[in-house]
Image: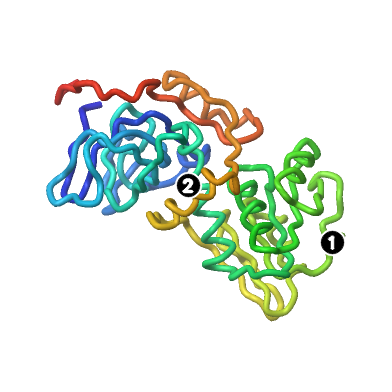
Amino acid sequence: MPHPHAAENDVIVRVHAAGFTPGELDWPATWSDRAGRDRTPSIPGHELSGVVVELGYGTTGLTVGQRVFGLTDWARNGSLAEFTAVEARNLAPLAADIDHAVAAALPISGLTAWQGLFDHAHLATGQTVLIHGAAGGVGSIAVQLAREVGAHVIGTGRADDRDLALSLGAQTFLDLDADDLRRVGEVDVVLDVIGGDILRRSTELVRPGGTVVTIATPPTVQPKDGRAVFFVVEPDRARLIDLAQRLRAGRLKPIVGAVRPLHETASAFARHRRAPGKTIIRVADDEAPRHQSADS
């Protein structure tokens, strides 16, 4: 692929580590631009950590040589490459003591968890929240954020996820393959990443005034006397800065799973692979920028 062009308010980032969502190959925006035009061949991946190497016209707030992390646009070439163009406002400064692989695991999971719990569900101290996929990328962050705010956290997942979910702060864990979901009783908030029958059955658990928030699919049923919300995560520099501060202070721990080299990216997308934590692609090992010609 050619070296990316920095449009107005863009920066070019030399990518050190990148994250991806396995299902993104099914997203229309992976293959077309915002006007619906085909843009193949395209580069997937929407989370990155790296170093700014070039500023587009009018770009402010970041400098060449600065370590950054953040979320790339859904309808442009993404982070699974040596260099990528990103809107500057979608990136946040990254402290020198945070490893790029850890930072790359934070943008989608961290922002999704925060926006789902607090921006959409308005989770508050003393409330009960049911978090599906409590050992996954989004769920593991959500468990930690919910506990810190003083909520009672019920996590779900597979049997192998129990110890991790409980260690992150879930007070109760349900095995979705073996346990009856009705055991949890009424809850104030459900954070769903699964959809389907799990989402439908979870909706029945929401007490009056409560909220179901899902990122899986627009809900077809509403809680009785409650709300059901579907949303897509949005970039937020201020929140990324806050999440990184929590990480540095030891208040937040992204779960990094396998860290694989760039040439193994295609196999990393294989759906049959299930490993704890978020798979990260390590693109570069050193901090020093290197020259990149315009046609290489």
Q: Is residue 115 left or right of residue 212?
A: left
Which residue occupies 75% across, 50% down?
Answer: 156
Q: Is residue 13 left or right of residue 7?
A: right
> What count of labels does the image hold?
2
In this picture, is 2 found above or below 59?
Answer: above
Q: Is residue 62 left or right of residue 57?
A: right
Q: Which residue is mark 2?
A: 244
Marks 2/1: CA–CA distance: 36 Å
Q: Position of residue 223 (x, y in %)?
A: 69, 73
Which residue occupies 60% across, 42% down?
Answer: 253
Q: Which residue is mark 1?
A: 182
* Element class at badge 2: helix
Q: Are marks 2 and 1 in contact (CB under 8 Å)?
A: no
Q: Position of residue 181 (x, y in %)?
A: 82, 57
Sequence order check: which comes first, mark 2 or mark 1? 1
Task: Specify the quadrant that holds the C terminus.
Answer: top left
In this picture, is 251 found above or below 151?
Answer: above
Which residue occupies 25% across, 26% down?
Answer: 1
Q: Is residue 159 left or right of residue 118?
A: right
Colouring convention used in this rendered image of the protein: rainbow
Q: Position of residue 11 (x, y in %)?
A: 23, 42
* Element class at badge 1: helix
Q: What amino acid does circle 2 point to?
A: Ala
Q: What amino acid does circle 1 point to?
A: Arg
Q: Position of residue 76 (x, y in %)?
A: 30, 43
Checking the image for residue 260, the label placed there is none
Which residue occupies 52% across, 67% down?
Answer: 119
The picture quadrant where one finds residue 184 is bottom right
